[in-house]
Amino acid sequence: MNKGVYSVSELNTYIKNIFDKDAILQHVKLEGELRDVKVYPSGHMYFSLIDKESSISAVMFASYREHLKFKPKDGDSVTVTGNVNVYIKNGKYQIYVSHMELSGEGAKLLALLKLKEKLFKEGLFDPSHKREINLYPHNIGLITAKGSAAESDLVTNIHRRYPLVNIYTFYSSVQGENAPFELIRALKLAYSYKLDTLIIGRGGGSTEDLDAFNNEELVRLAYKSPFPIIAAVGHEIDYTLLDYVADKRASTPTGAAELATVDKREIYETLDNMQSIMEDSILKRIQLIKDKLTLLSSRPFFKNPSTIYKDKLNEIKLIKESLNNAMKLYLSNKTSDLRSVRERLQGVNPKRVLDRGFALLKGKNGKIVKKVSEINVGEEIETTLSDGKLYANVSRKEKHV
């Protein structure tokens, strides 16, 4: 390229060819902060990538942008991969990005969001798993840093509100590299106690300070808690994964104490109200009984008691007369029936039959003779008449044909 005067396009094209032949520029990885991020209707995304001293223009075409796992925004720390080249039309060089991922705190946040989504899909944050807090506990457990302001606030406020409860404290660091391990150890120890509620608390802090409470093993262990857990590890806007899995969440240790217990003043007030209700109920009951007694005393019986038993005596007299008449009629009917039966029995009396000229014959064996064939000639027979008996021997017998 040595002809004297060149056009702008020729120069830009020449420079572009140099970029195209440079192996390093064809596959570059850059780390920096996003600035002036804009997505056009075409889907292409234009932005600048900056560090403390420099910046470079960048573009990510729609075909690559649609594969991003996050939504880029100004201020994100990212690592990009692409090729650097010259745009002939304006002679500016820029990086054409084919891949982008969060780096530093951004990558950390993305990993946390992925873990949150995974645990959510597994049901660890499901509201149906949340349990109600027993507001009249016997034993409350605390997991917090020894000698911390959070410990002091929790113990002071719990005893102030509900002094009857026993408090068991399981100490652990609440930030730093060893915090997740110590929190898990304290939680396992707490599970060996018979607690009504467990509070895991600290006095807030930066997002980095709260990292220990995003530990997956800690969150899964808290999900299996045999008793309700109250999380009090951040401020109003700082949520950790432990906050999501806990049964209740408080923004401060004082708030956790209020969630864990009923205020003794509420108990006194409730007892006073119940006493008033009981006294009113008793007084109303007494007045009701008095009214009933007044009503009863005004009735005729209490003014003239004899009226009741005289009426009853008359009723008894009438019943007695009715029973006597019924009994007489019953006896008369039975007497008549007995007379009729007696007459029928007399009609079949054997003696009456004998009086009419009939006789009763018995053989030598004492059996009644009914047929001629039952007696032989010469046998003795006993003949019973109405006034006595005859004994004779059979000299002859005839049988009717």
Image: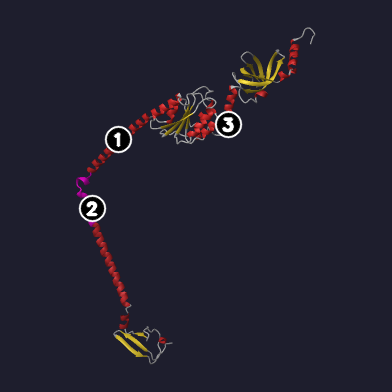
Specify which label sits upstream in the sequence, 1 or 3.
3
Front one among 201 and 328: 201
Residue 111 x %, y %: 59, 27
Residue 177 x %, y %: 55, 26
At horizontal 64% and vertical 21% (from top left) the residue drawn is 79
Q: Which residue lies furthest to the right in this view?
A: 3
Secondary structure beneath dot 2 equals: helix
Mark 2 neighbour class, 10 Å CA radius: few under 14, some 14 to 19, many 20 or more:
few
Above or below residue 293? Residue 81 is: above
Secondary structure beneath dot 1 equals: helix
| Main SS, magenta residues | helix
Mark 2 and mark 1: Cα distance apart in space: 44 Å
Q: Does the magenta stretch include residue 311?
A: yes
- Nearer the viewer's eye, disc 2 or disc 1? 1
The residue carrying mark 2 is 312
Q: Quadrant of the C terminus?
A: bottom left
Specify which label sits upstream in the sequence, 2 or 1.
1
Specify which label sits upstream in the sequence, 2 or 3.
3
The residue carrying mark 3 is 118
Magenta range is: 298-317
Front one among 33 and 364: 33
At horizontal 68% and vertical 18% (from top left) the residue drawn is 95
Q: Does the magenta stretch include residue 239?
A: no
- Nearer the viewer's eye, disc 1 or disc 3? 3
Secondary structure beneath dot 3 equals: helix
Residue 134 x %, y %: 43, 34
The residue carrying mark 1 is 279
Mark 1 and mark 3: Cα distance apart in space: 58 Å
Residue 309 visible in the picture:
yes
Residue 337 x %, y %: 30, 70
